[in-house]
Image (spheres, grey):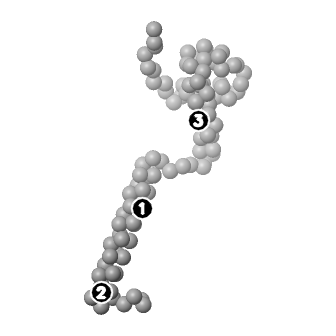
């Protein structure tokens, strides 16, 4: 019978990942001890190693910041297109000098 899906706390994940990094026990032993699949332990260990640098100050933009950056880049693109359109329209009417 399948076990129901469990949500582990970040503290638990960190504890398991640190135990895997230490290497005192095999993955099979850790999986049995913590009652978590060995593949899950490997994922948590990899994630901890990837993000270890952020503990000491190096950080990546938060997902919200990434969305804000994309929105701002889209707005810049829109404004650049509008400026180009208006410059072309003003050039046709003779109200804008391209030599500026």
Mark toward the start of the polypeptide (2 vs 1)? 1
Which type of secondary structure does the marked residue at label 1 adopt?
Answer: helix
Q: Which mark is residue 90?
A: none
Q: Earlier in the sequence, mark 1 or mark 3?
A: 3
Task: Describe residue 6's horizontal placement relative to residue 14 as left or right.
Answer: left
How many numbered discs, if any? 3
Mark sitting on residue 73: 1
Q: Quadrant of the C terminus?
A: bottom left
Residue drawn at the location 46% of the way across and 13% of the way down: 3
Q: Are marks 1 and 3 in contact (CB under 8 Å)?
A: no
Mark 1, mark 3: which one is toward the viewer? Answer: 1
* Image position of 48 with respect to 85: above or below: above
Q: Secondary structure at mark 3?
A: helix
- Up/down of 84 relative to 22, above or below: below
* Mark 3 or mark 2, whichever is nearer to me: 2
Q: Which mark is residue 47?
A: 3
Q: Position of residue 28 (x, y in %)?
A: 65, 16
Disc 1 residue crowd, few under 14, some 14–19, many 20+, Cα 10 Å: few
Q: For residue 72, which quarter of the picture? A: bottom left
In which quarter of the view is residue 32 placed?
Answer: top right
Mark 3–mark 2 CB contact (< 8 Å): no
Which residue is labeled 2 in the image?
Answer: 92
* Residue 96 in the image, given as x and y percentages of width and height: 33, 88
Distance (Cα) linking label 2 and label 1: 29 Å
Looking at this view, is 88 or 60 the one in front? Answer: 88
Vertical side of 67 occupied by 78: above or below: below
């Amino acid at each position: 019978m399948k076990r129901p899906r469990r949500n582990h706390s970040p503290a638990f994940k960190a504890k398991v990942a640190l135990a895997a990094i230490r290497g005192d026990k095999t993955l099979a032993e850790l999986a049995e001890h913590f009652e978590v699949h060995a593949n899950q332990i490997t994922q948590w260990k990899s994630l901890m190693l990837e993000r270890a640098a952020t503990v000491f100050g190096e950080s990546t933009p938060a997902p919200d910041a990434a969305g804000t950056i994309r929105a701002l880049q889209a707005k810049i693109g829109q404004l650049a297109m509008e400026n180009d359109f208006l410059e072309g329209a003003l050039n046709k009417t003779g109200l804008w000098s391209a030599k500026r």
